[in-house]
Image (cartoon, helix red, strand yellow):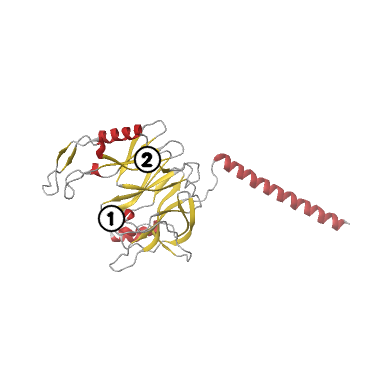
Amino acid sequence: MKKTLAIFAMASIQASLLCFVIASENQVTAQQVKSGRTQQPKVILGVLEDLPGEYAGDSDFRAVRAVFEKNSDGWSAFPTSAKSELDLQSLAKSYPNSVTWTIAFDGKNLGVVTAETPKKYNFYSEIGIETITSKRPVPTVGKKSTDYAGFTGDPVYRPLVAISQPNVSDSDHWKPAQLSQDLIASARQQFRSKFPIVTNCRNADENIPRSWKYHDEDIHITKAYASNDNWSLIDLNLTGYACDGPQGDDSAFVGQWYVKNPAGELRFLGTDMWLVDAGDYDNRGSSEVLFSIDRYNRGGYRLFYRNFTRSAEFEFSYQ
């Protein structure tokens, strides 16, 4: 009888200790939540790319480029600066060893791939690249096109967002849009404010840039998108370039991106870029917007977030 009572008492003590531990753990968890110090999974943003072979005769290949990571202050780009071949080779140590990526497009989950960072990068254009190691099919959207070629000019598949967490939804529902005549007029006015003076050639044979008085109809709306909370993105450029190759400042003839907020205010965002996709990649209730950088000998990505008040840039050279 005494032995039975002793066993019962010991079991009661163990149960009490277990309850105390669970209560303590729950209390710590509650304190962490209250203080905002809960451990969240790291979110890394990448892009699934179709890349031409490095040497003549090499086949193109698919790979994921790690570009941004989320931290407590916002989004930051992985390092891309390399002043020497030694810097370039050691840069790979700054990137995640291996990531299982969820591939997303237009708010949809297209599949999963696993990729690994090489021991070193051999070319500047490889910065951030991870080799796909999984055997499952690699997601693809559409056909190869020079629209996504960038500096190399080779037709490739459309780049797709890759995310280390399955955060694929586009909370703001960005879609191609038809702009109102009032908004088009406002956008053209902003364009004129940015480019009050433009030069152009009479023809390619003469090839002498002169002051050119352009008309509103010459300001072309190339792309336009709108969100469900009344934000708009507008891509404008001048048409009718008549010079034979670059002549002085011809930036007005390159796409100029503007953003309009719900109050109707327009603001310049940038140039030499095109829209890749939008999504709530950090799962915080609003979408980030990702652009591809497309300029001479330069590639990379720009990420806009917090209603376009903040941005991060990942840029590399091809040579």
Q: Is residue 3 left or right of residue 51?
A: right
Residue under the point 49% across and 47% down: 169
Find residue 193 and report its horizontal and vertical position in percent: 26, 33
Inspect this view and state whether residue 38 appears: yes
Inspect this view and state whether residue 87 appears: no
Question: Which labelled disc corresponds to residue 151?
Answer: 1
Given the current orientation, which residue lies at the most extreme top position?
263
Which of the 4 quarters of the picture holds residue 60? bottom left
Find residue 102 and report its horizontal and vertical position in percent: 48, 55
Between 29 and 185, the one nearer to me in the picture = 185
In the rendered image, which quarter contains the N terminus? bottom right
Q: Work out whether 97 lies above or below 262.
A: below
Find residue 306 and report its horizontal and vertical position in percent: 43, 39
Between 92 and 51, the one nearer to me in the picture = 51
Q: Comparing marks 2 and 1, which lies closer to the viewer?
A: 2
Which of the 4 quarters of the picture holds residue 64? bottom left
Q: Are marks 2 and 1 in contact (CB under 8 Å)?
A: no
The residue tagged 2 is 233
Q: Residues within 10 Å of mark 1 (few under 14, many from 20)?
A: some
